[in-house]
Amino acid sequence: MLLGAHVGTAGGYVNAVTSGEELNADVIQIFTRNQMQWKPKPLDRRAALDFREAFKSSRLKAAVAHGSYLINLATPEKKLRAMSVKAVLDEVGRCDALGIGAYIFHPGSHVGSGEEKGEAREAESLTEILSATENMDVKLALEGMAGQGNVICHDFQAIRRVLDAVDSERLGVCIDTCHMFAAGYDMRDEDSLAETMHHFKKEIGMKKLLAVHLNDSKGELGCRRDRHENIGKGKIGIDGFRALMHYPGLGRIPMALETPGIGEYRREIELLRKLASS
């Protein structure tokens, strides 16, 4: 299993590598720029090269990036969608410079215009982005959502529709366990996880799975609320994560914690490893 966590880059990208090693992680996830600003500082190419060198000499096995929370590729607001496309292009370019092969992003909201129109705009935006970055060795991972408000892509069928509309080998999926559970897909034990993954494989396929976010859920099954909880302390529970750690085909997939309390990450990584070996 490739287990790790989201880590900060304050003071330089290299510090993310240091943090990952301190957590005894296999995987790190980072923001490539300030996730709450539209106009970030330009990428420091020397810092990017330093990150590449530090990562190569570390014990880490994978690095992924998470997109800005401001981005909405599904919005009907033309200015916001143009800004979102521009931001993703910048962030994918940063991933390329940093040597990060997977960029995870939230699909966004249809803002009341309806899921069908939101999905169509999502596909149009992604087609533009993938075309503009075709010379980059970076895959994009659409993150499945909890279904809160007007956010799109909270079920496997909707994700499949976007994937089909874009039709690119560089577009894949990130499963967030909290989001998936909140959207109504059970994983509290081996049998329920097997049924959920059967649906996932039928609609999307394991080849499209690029990353997993490991989060327990404060909310009940199907609550459609995006509320992360620490592993084993939420409604999914220890048995659900034990089942996930034993599920076939996940050994090569980068899995990163986004649970509350960064100080818990090392303990949770060790807990997940124990579950995997039990």
Image (cartoon, rainbow, N blue to C red):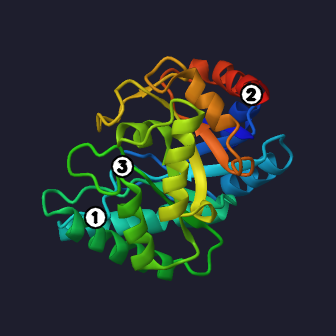
First-in-chain label (3 vs 2): 3
Q: Residues within 10 Å of mark 1 (few under 14, many from 20)?
A: many
* Residue 105 placement: quadrant: bottom left
Q: What element carries label 3?
A: loop
Name, please, the residue furthest toward the right.
57
Residue type of the residue flagged with mark 2: Arg
Q: Which of marks 3 and 1 is nearer the N terminus?
A: 3
Q: Which secondary structure, mark 2?
A: helix
Q: What element carries label 1?
A: loop
Q: Which mark is residue 273?
A: 2
Q: Residue 37 carries which label?
A: 3
Quick check: 172 above or below 238? Answer: below
Q: Distance between the residues labelled 3 and 2?
A: 36 Å
| Residue 184 in picture, x, y percent from top left | 36, 41
In the rendered structure, the answer to whether residue 8 lies left or right of residue 87 reads: right
Residue drawn at x 35%, y 43% as measured from the top left: 183
Label 1 belongs to which residue?
A: 74
Q: Is residue 10 in sight in this rendering?
A: no
- Look at 36% across and 49% down and name the residue there: 37
The N terminus lies in which quarter of the figure? Answer: top right
When the figure is inspected, residue 100 is found, relative to residue 130, above or below; the finding is above
Q: In this view, does 159 lie above or below 34?
A: below
In percent of width and height, residue 118 lies at 24, 66
